[in-house]
Amino acid sequence: MTEDVKSPRLPGGSLLSSYLDRQLMVWSDRGGASRHIGDGWAAHCSAWLSGAVGAEWPVPGGQPFIVSDILRLDDIPGVSREANQYHLENPDFLIIGSRPDEPTTALVEAVDAKFAADRIKPSQVSAQIVENLLTIPKDGVTRQLLQETLDARGFERYVISDGSFMCPDSALTEFLLKRASRQRNNPSPSAEIIRIEPSPGVMFDGVGTGALIGQLARQDQLPVSPRDNLLSTIYYFRVACACAYLYGEQHAPLFTVQDTELPEIGLVSAELTRRAKPEHSAYRLMLDLVDEAEIIREARQSVANVASLPLRMTEIRGLLQRSGLDEESAKIALRILRRDLELEFRRRLFEVVGEISADDPRTLGDILDEVAHAARNLRPDLHAYAINLVAEAAATRSPD
């Protein structure tokens, strides 16, 4: 049976078309879908690479070498932080090994785990990008990691070659590569692509929303299972992430100063069960949540509009201008002052109106009137607070 499946219960009529559905992409990514998919694929590639130690590794346009070490860079915060600081790209892995005829020369190749093959950028695994990571700065994190490995293995020198990408051995990869090649000014990627067998059934183990995949798949009753069909797994995981996000949007407070916690997956599952009808697809369940979440989102935005700082920017700038600060200091102080005033205002407003839940029984008009009234009453206190903050800022920058 083909990996792709056609069904009227799927957006676009098939699993491959569902992958491209823009509405699903937007809502699922707000629930962290793409991040979890990338993390899950990187973890799968890492496990696969661990079995490559001692085996031959291909070199694009060159002779293969025997792998001795795998450095996983994407799991080390210091590497990505350093790459961002110096505006560099960084691959997920460095493969290190040697050839029998040159045992003291290490061969280094970058490898990047790329679930979506149409997002391949050959520069990300080029020899040049690895060279940049190792030399900018000279005593950087990546350089130190590689040097420790070279010293432990007794290598005297190293040579860097262009690297590879690891993509799933799936109809999805073929589809995305063909689609990318048809796009104007976007030829097929020239980088080496290594296709490895995915493990759909365990790709999202440990991710809370993954627990909803089976429930949503049963709603559609497709002739494939997410346990062994990658397209099915990705589709229902995206629907699960979207549903979890939308459920959270429906129940998050209209006003609070507390961090909003992610909803318990059991509650989301119970809500989907309550809404499920035989004629409804999993996608239809998500769309119903979209419509209702949008109502709550608009109400939350209306509350945010009236729960705004009761001081105009012109007033704040005027206080700073009269403080005697020089122009540069005033610019810095303005950003800090605005932030501190916003935080203090929300804290004081919360003391007055408390947390306003999404299911507050009052009409939205009554809620807005109360919040607006409380915000206006806080104006004198906030003005006095702003004067004190400006005085403190001026004092700390005084020549004396």
Image (tube, rainbow, N blue to C red):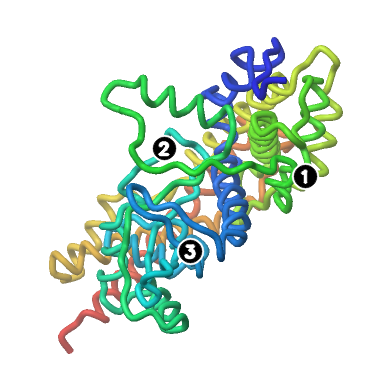
Q: Residues within 10 Å of mark 3 (few under 14, many from 20)?
A: some
Residue 363 visible? The answer is: no
Residue at which label 1 appears: 265
Query: Quick one: SS at disc 1?
Result: helix
Quarter-of-image position of residue 30: top right
Is 399 left or right of 76, judged from the image as shown?
A: left
Q: Residues within 10 Å of mark 2 (few under 14, many from 20)?
A: few
Counting residues from the N terminus, which is met first, the one under dot 3 or under dot 2?
A: 3
- The image shows residue 77 at horizontal and vertical percentages of 47, 67
Q: Is residue 295 above or below residue 325?
A: above
The amino acid sitting under disc 3 is Ile
Discs 1/2, front: 2
Tell which residue pokes out farthest to the front in this image: 101
Residue 59 visible? The answer is: yes
- The image shows residue 219 at horizontal and vertical percentages of 81, 23
Report the number of discs. Answer: 3
Marks 1 and 2, Cα distance to the nearest angstrom?
31 Å
Counting residues from the N terminus, which is met first, the one under dot 3 or under dot 1?
A: 3
Q: Is residue 64 above or below residue 220?
A: below
- The image shows residue 159 at horizontal and vertical percentages of 30, 66
Q: Determine whether label 3 and label 1 are within 8 Å by CB.
A: no
Tell me which residue sits at (55%, 24%) in the image. Answer: 23
Is 124 left or right of 225, judged from the image as shown?
A: left
Quarter-of-image position of residue 96: bottom left
Residue at which label 2 appears: 119
Tell me which residue sits at (18%, 62%) in the image. Answer: 321
Q: Determine whether label 1 and label 2 are within 8 Å by CB.
A: no
Tell me which residue sits at (52%, 55%) in the image. Answer: 346
Nearest the viewer among 361 and 373 is 361
Quarter-of-image position of residue 139: bottom left
Residue at which label 3 appears: 66
Marks 3 and 2, Cα distance to the nearest angstrom?
29 Å
